[in-house]
Image (cartoon, coloured by chain):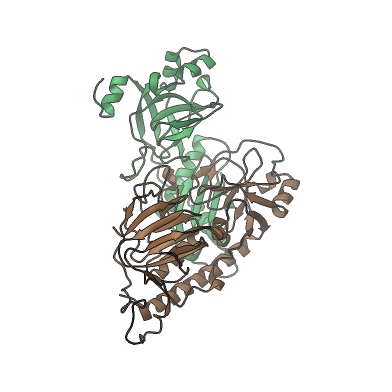
Amino acid sequence: MAWSFFPLGDSAVLIEFGSGVDEKIHQEIRAAVRRIEGRPFPGFIECVSAFNTLCVYYDLMGLRLPGRKMTAYEHVCSLLREMEKTAGDDKEVQSGQVIDIPVCYGGEFGPDLGHVAELNGLSEEDVISIHAGGQYLVYAIGFAPGFPYLGGMPDTIAAPRKKTPRLSIPAGSVGIAGAQTGIYPIETPGGWQIIGRTPLELFRPGDSPPTLLQGGDYIRFCPIGPEEYRRLRGMQPL
Amino acid sequence: MSIRIHKPGLLTTVQDLGRTGYGKYGVIVSGAMDRSAHRIANWIAGNDDSAAALEITLSGFAAEFGQDHWIAITGGQMTPVINGRDVPMWRPVFVRQGSRLVFKRPVSGCRAYLAVSGGLDVPVVLGSRSTYLRAGIGGFEGRALKAGDELSVGLAPLRNPHPFPGERESRQSKASTISGAAGEDGSFYAVSWAVPWSVLPAYSPNPEIRFVRGRQWDDFTLRSRQAFAESSYKVTPQSDRMGYRLAGSPIMLESPREYLSEAVALGTVQIPADGQSIVLMADRQTLGGYPKIAQVISVDLPVMAQAAPGEHIKFREVTLQEAESLYLCQERKLKRLEMMIRLKLKEGYHA
């Protein structure tokens, strides 16, 4: 798929790689990121990728503009086109790691589990086994630090957002919004249906990298009980 | 301790030029809203671009200096006074230990920057000293300042003036750069030169803000595009460091649809379903799912950042090429300003 370029103002280029949520497109974007970060051009600041786009931020003052004939935007596009030409020269794309996310479903940690089950005509156990039965690709990290945009949740457990968002959802909460599932890395207000909570910390500002998950990783949810949750959080047993 | 906060006012945070390089982890850039005023404040205080300073919003701020300091106040005019006397902005000011700085009332603009020679000494988190309020990291304990907070200051690159011009002098000091206005009680002393207005961003109440077309410009109705470019929009009180929420003639899509989330930038103008624009600012999230009608050009971001609730914004379209040359031209001007300030400081007070 050819890269299409769009200016995002005077200091960034957005590259589009096809349309829709697609694992192939995602792998192509990851390969592009590696190439751009591996050979950063003068003035390059950073890359931020999403489902089918990649944004390249640059510092206008740091670019080495060849002359007055070309705008800075055109100059950056031409540098990126050079990189596009070498696409496919990469050795096999390194596949992401598979990370197990222990989740204590239902009860105080997952107050909306019953509601999600009822909406879909299932038992709570069914929802848990469907949610924990699949493998999810981390398409992107955004919205909050370390928040994974995940693909691959079966529609059979989909549930619309709450009409009135909760004022505060604890860090680690696992939720469903429409046909998406996700994990809240930090305490924030939010309208997702909360079905469980993980004891793992997704945002680790003291570590490098600062997040548990990265684009390209796969995750699996593993059901645990409240005792196990407390143990993993380093809390006293009940 | 070197600065003790008596009252934080509406919102006071420690900011530098932001946290870049972590967008792919969902970590926002943060940093000063008005980056020009922030940078200039640091230069005047003898600091580098990257030093941390206070961003003070609208009104209610009061603090006391625990030591003698060179400081600089830039940005919005919010009537700063030291021990009751007006203190001039956009120039070096030497404050004595125990002096009390208060912002009395906002006159124009809505964010002031207080830089202290040596920079605010807070830990660097993920490459920056900026406060990331929602994640609770960076800045001073990852939060907005409260009454009673005490901030430390790094080693000052400027030396203290001697003799202190406010004190009774036996003879006129030879160094003419040390002439200026002192507080009556000798609480502060301001030098006679200041940053010329001609190099500052085009600050103005009800400003005109220039934009280039956004990625989904063509998806909006003709009437909406005309309204955006021709009518004026009011800054609502719901505006904050994350974004300016504007109210006015609604902007509607030709045919409503869902967009996949993608990266946004400082100054992205996105349109949610209610048709009211949000101009994304320093604390924007990394990705957004709303269609983007426009992008505020870089040179006008400091002007935007000083717009206060109740003011009106008028947008005007420019080409990408114009936006780029305006930016390069402004940066060259600022580079010259930085050199001029450093020379002035060298004549006077460099350690």
Residue B30 point in image, percent of width and height: 45, 51
Q: Is residue A56 left or right of residue B129?
A: right
Q: Position of residue A137 (x, y in %)?
A: 44, 33
Colour of chain B in the rendered structure image:
brown
Quick one: quadrant of the N terminus of chain B?
A: bottom left
Q: Is residue A62 visible?
A: yes
Chain with green colouring: A
Q: Is residue A236 above or below residue B272?
A: above
Question: Which residue appears at 69% of the width and 50% of the height?
Answer: B228
Name the spot of residue B280 as percent of width and height, x first.
55, 49
Q: In terms of image quadrants, where is residue A202?
A: top left
Residue at 37% across, 84% down: B175
| Residue B130 seen anywhere in this rendered image of the structure | no
Residue projecting furthest to the right: B223
User: Position of B111 compared to B98: left or right?
Assistant: right
Quadrant of the image occupied by residue A206:
top left
Q: Nearer the viewer, residue B197 or A188?
A: B197
Q: Residue furthest left?
A: A236
- Marks counted in the figure total 0
Would you place residue B231 above or below residue A224 in this image?
below
Q: Nearer the viewer, residue B277 or A6?
A: B277
Give percent across and percent down for residue B127. Answer: 36, 53
The residue located at (31%, 79%) in the rendering is B163
- The quadrant of the rendering that contains the C terminus of chain B is bottom left
Q: Is residue B77 above or below residue A195?
A: below
